[in-house]
Image (cartoon, grey):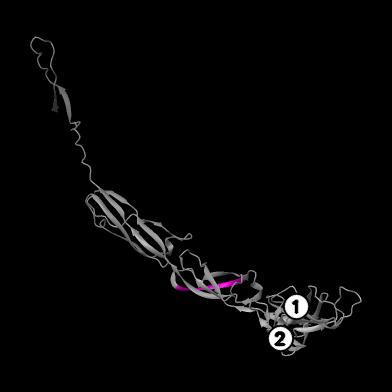
Amino acid sequence: MTAAGKTYDGQTSGTTSSYTLSAPNVSLSGTLSYTTGSKNAGSYSTANTTGNTLTLSGLYSDQQGYDISYVPTTLSIYKAALTVSNLAASNKVYDSSTTAAVSGTLNGRIGSDAVTLGGGSFSDKNAGNGKTVTANLTGNDAGNYTLQSAATSADITQAALTITATGVNKTYDGTTATSVTFSDNRIAGDILNVSGTAAFNDKNAGNGKAVNISSILLSGDAAANYTYNTAATTSADITQAALNITANNASKAYNGQTYSGGNGVTYAGFINGEDSSVLTGTLAYGGTSQGAATPGNYTITPAGLSANNYTLTFVNGTLTITSPTTPSTPPPRLTNQSRLRCGDCLRPAPGTNHRPFQFFRAIRR
């Protein structure tokens, strides 16, 4: 028997006249029969002892005295063709798969074989109109068939993506700009990037403040498969910024008078070019400096100011009252009412011609 084949017919045995003999001009009796290891499409060989086996028999030589043996060979069972009538595919919403639902009637099934029109596959997973759908077979015997004219078309519509935002708290910076984190209901594994512009309704500090997100944009490999919202809302806090108000140091010389007030303050921490004009209240001073009169060091404590957008920290300054200095007493001065007159000279010391000193007298005229 030469290599031969047949189309799947659901049978494990059959006959064939396609063989050659090693001895020419010999006529054998009977019909060459074969038996395959299963009915299924595939390749079978007389060399196999298990699985896809092929067994030949049925020829004999009557009275001609020939011993008959079969040369190793193969037999192929080819898949049978099925056709489908009224083939149609259903539109679907994007789900990141190529799976399609199809309907139709199969024609050409053999006997009670377990084969049905099981579904279909889109040409790719992406959203689009009029996409090619190829029908598939399913069932235990589906591997024995090919499906002819199995193509149709259907649409994959974009899936609805809901983009939500979670606000991120910030410290007061004098602007409404802020940031948010995005989340959505994308299909697992899809690559998407979400961006947008987030802003508070106003710049002022507060808790649970509304945040509006606009110009939301979707990008990434799977972006074209979704429709999405371009705006969203959330909330977040703007906490107060820190502002230090430090009393300037002051000094005075003791004069017996009590001290009151201060020497002004210095600010540290204003945001975005702001200044003391954003503060409310009236600057006041306290501390041990108020009413101090005697020499020493005293605290100047600033107070009286407040702000909606700042947490104020008041820092003390120092008042220094210095001790008074004692002036020196000048020598007495002669007036023009007096004049100096040379007095008598003392006599020289004994044995000398020197006068030890002279004296002057102030004589009033």
Q: Position of residue 58 (x, y in %)?
A: 80, 83
- In percent of width and height, residue 169 lies at 46, 68
Q: Which residue is mark 2?
A: 117
Residue type at mark 1?
Answer: Leu
Instruction: Out of 306 and 124, give the one closest to the viewer.
Output: 124
Q: Which residue is mark 1?
A: 54
Q: Is residue 71 magenta?
A: no
Left or right: residue 47 compared with residue 273: right
Q: Inspect this view and state whether residue 201 appears.
A: no
Marks 1 and 2 sit apart, C-alpha to C-alpha, by 31 Å
Q: 185 or 323: which is nearer to us?
A: 185
Position of the N terminus, as image quadrant, is bottom right
In this view of the protein, can residue 95 be seen by the observer?
yes
Question: Residue 71, relative to residue 348: is it above or below?
Answer: below
Figure check: 104 above or below 240: below
**What kind of residue is marked 2?**
Leu
Whole-percent x and y of residue 174? 48, 64
In the picture as drawn, the residue positioned furthest to the right comes out as: 25
The region drawn magenta spans 208-217
Q: Residue at x 82, y 81 (%)?
A: 59
Main SS type for the magenta part? Answer: strand
Check contact, mark 1 vs mark 2: CB within 8 A.
no
The residue closer to the viewer here, 212 or 94, is: 94
Nearest the camera: 186 or 239? 186
The reply to whether the magenta stretch includes residue 209 is yes
Q: Position of residue 310 (x, y in %)?
A: 41, 64
Of helix, strand and loop, which one carries label 2? strand
Query: Mark 2 Cα within 10 Å, few/some/many (few <14, many 20+)?
Result: many
Q: Count of labels shown? A: 2
Q: Is residue 346 above or below residue 168?
A: above
